[in-house]
Image (cartoon, rainbow, N blue to C red):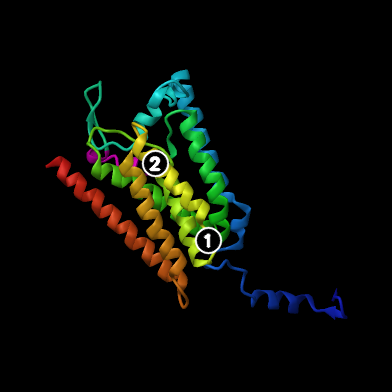
Amino acid sequence: MNEATVGHQCPDCVKEGRRGQRSARTAFGGSRAGQLGYVTTAIIVVNSLVMVGSAILGGPSAIFGGGSWGLLGSGTPITDFGEVLGIALYPNGELHGVATGEWYRLVTAMFLHYGILHLLLNMMLVAQLGRYLESQLGPLRFAALYMLAGIGGNVTAYVVQAPNQPSAGASTATFGLIIAVIVINRKLMRDSSSMTSMLILNLIFTFTIPNISIAGHLGGLLVGGAGAAVMAYANQPKRSTKQAIGCSVILLLIVVAAMLRTSFILN
């Protein structure tokens, strides 16, 4: 027997009772483990490690000294391998790009950055917004939202930009995080004025600073907002099923858009 506040408890009875208890969930059906921020931390670590690899292969110029106003880094073998690119002829005479079958670029591009400043700006947003969203949605739902927004932005860039125009960065996903906080706070009836100001400021930067993927940012914003709305407004019963179906439909539309763009480029 185990000692209790009053009397004693049978160990087997306690175990049986715990099996019948439902685990604590967030307001949107996610696990409370999201409060630990494991997914947010993992995203920052992966992006940072990829930047280290780019610096090793690309040298000092990969960190700083190029791009917009000399504040960004140059491309490296890693960014060449994984950035969003429709189709282009490389110096060695080979064709590369999503249209040649390199579909992985639509995922890998969100983990690549042109220089340390590019990385820091995006990871500051991930750290600030990711921890909050992960605590509200839970690890699995937050990871799904982040990937959905990132891929959505990359596909939008692929569809809209010139086929030989490359782009990369986590900003496709971070724009999705900004709008997601607004959507989640609206559902929870919390103030989002600071997030609205952040969104406006980032949109101003998007349209005024040269060499920024406008399509990628707007695509991440649109898809992130749609994914967040699915997460926030899917109600019981079978909320998890509704969320999964809603996000799957969004992903399907993204894939169809990428396939149509590929067909257009090749034809």
- Where does label 1 land, which residue? 137
Residue 151 sits above or below residue 184 on the image: above
Extent of the magenta region: 98-108
Locate residue 87, reporting x and y percent: 23, 35
Name the amino acid type tagged 2.
Answer: Ile
Q: Is residue 196 visible?
A: yes
Residue 14 sits above or below residue 157 on the image: below
Query: Which quadrant does the N terminus fall into?
Result: bottom right
Q: Residue at x 42, y 51 (%)?
A: 176
Locate residue 200, reporting x and y percent: 42, 47
Residue 143 sits above or below residue 44 on the image: below
Measured in 3D between alpha carbons, the distance from the residue under mark 1 to the one under mark 2, in whole angstroms, is: 29 Å
Query: Which quadrant does the C terminus fall into?
Result: top left
At numbered mark 2, what does the secondary structure look like: helix, strand or loop? Answer: helix
Q: Is residue 108 visible?
A: no
Q: Residue at x 53, y 61 (%)?
A: 137
Q: Is residue 179 left or right of residue 210?
A: right
- Where does label 2 land, which residue? 204
Q: Magenta segment, principal secondary structure?
A: helix
Locate residue 94, reporting x and y percent: 23, 27
* Residue 104 within the segment the image draws in magenta: yes
The front one of 215 and 107 is 215
Quick one: label 1 or label 2, which is nearer the N terminus?
A: 1
The front one of 13 and 160 is 160
* Residue 79 within the segment the image draws in magenta: no
Name the amino acid type tagged 1.
Answer: Leu
Q: Is residue 119 left or right of residue 79?
A: right
